[in-house]
Image (cartoon, rainbow, N blue to C red):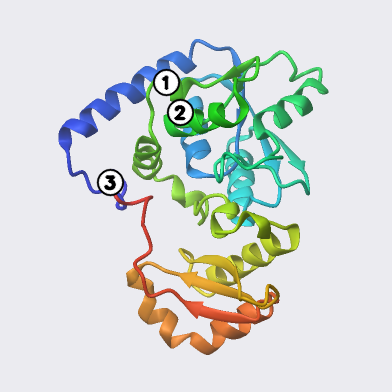
Amino acid sequence: MGANVVVLDLGYDHSFQAREQLLIERLASFDELIVSFSGRLESCYSIDLCRASGVKIRAITLDNPTRSRSEVARARRYCQRYGIEHWVIKSDEIVFYDRWPHVDGLIDPVRCIGEHVQHCPEWAQLPLLIPAAVEEQTDYLAQFGSLPANTLWLFADNGVTSRDFRYGFNKRQLGRWGKGGNGCLSDRFTNPGLLELRYLRMVDQAEQMLADMGLDEAQVFFHTLCDGHTTLARVSLPGHLRAQAFDMQSDILSALKATEFDLVTLDMAQQDRHDFAL
């Protein structure tokens, strides 16, 4: 068992293992699948179960501004290691649905991937596995109304929750493929009106720089002051990294100002450690 997982409920662990085995058996019933592989923990866990089932895998990554570079890099490393055919679609469109699900004008990421797949004859007839939890499927349906044809929502349909994905990811020690997993970069914005390509890139660059400085669990939240122009980076860290961050204040300030933030603050509230709170 991974060092990052603390089993608080052995009954849960046993039921989790039984359901995981059932998922592997159901995946094994397919000859070949396309896996939507973002590099986030849900897709890492899903593709790992696909490998365990023996099904032939093709991976597809929609690399858009809401995806962090660390997650895309993790997806690449995983596919290279196991010889999985990997198609990375690069787009500057802001594509997401797991944040502010009722905002108008959102691009449907699942249908976006499906449209690309339909233009590739070797891929077009294969089912597209969506590594979504029950909660994500519910949000998706609330926003887009129906599930696209030829998509497979095996995990959500079998009651897999976000907690289950986190548990499986850590138990299989999938974090070894690279740091990351802090979720969609759109989560760093409290105001949807500020979601712009240049601001997303500032957040992504800031988090990369902090990771290079040893603060790999840092999240950088984007704010503007009342004037609407002055930008502020609010750095959130888990408790065990705060002392290190205090000792590096001047370095952090210089690094984040280099990404064009005007002001930098350190959030004193405890970061919610979802990936480890089992």
Which residue is depicted at the point 54% across and 19% down? 55
Q: Determine the secondary structure under disc 3.
A: loop
10 Å crowding of disc 2: few (<14), some (14-19), many (20+): many
Look at mark 1 in the image and give the residue it sits on: 24
Looking at the picture, does residue 4 appear above or below residue 249? above
Q: Determine the secondary structure under disc 2.
A: helix
Quarter of the rendering containing residue 168: top left
Q: Earlier in the sequence, mark 1 or mark 3?
A: 1
Which residue is depicted at the point 67% across and 57% down? 193
Circle 1: residue type? Ile
Look at mark 3 in the image and give the residue it sits on: 278
Q: Determine the secondary structure under disc 1.
A: helix
* Mark 2 or 3, closer to the camera: 3
Circle 3: residue type? Leu
Residue 122 in the image: state x and y as whole percent: 77, 18
10 Å crowding of disc 1: few (<14), some (14-19), many (20+): some
* Mark 1 or 3, closer to the camera: 3
Do callouts 1 and 2 mark residues in contact (Cβ within 8 Å)?
A: yes
Do callouts 1 and 3 mark residues in contact (Cβ within 8 Å)?
A: no
Residue 166 in the image: state x and y as whole percent: 38, 42
**In terms of depth relative to the viewer, which is nearer, 80 or 209?**
209
Residue 256 in the image: state x and y as whole percent: 62, 77
Q: Earlier in the sequence, mark 1 or mark 2?
A: 1
In the rendered structure, the answer to whether residue 33 lies left or right of residue 246 reads: right
Look at mark 2 in the image and give the residue it sits on: 49
**In terms of depth relative to the viewer, which is nearer, 128 or 84?**
128
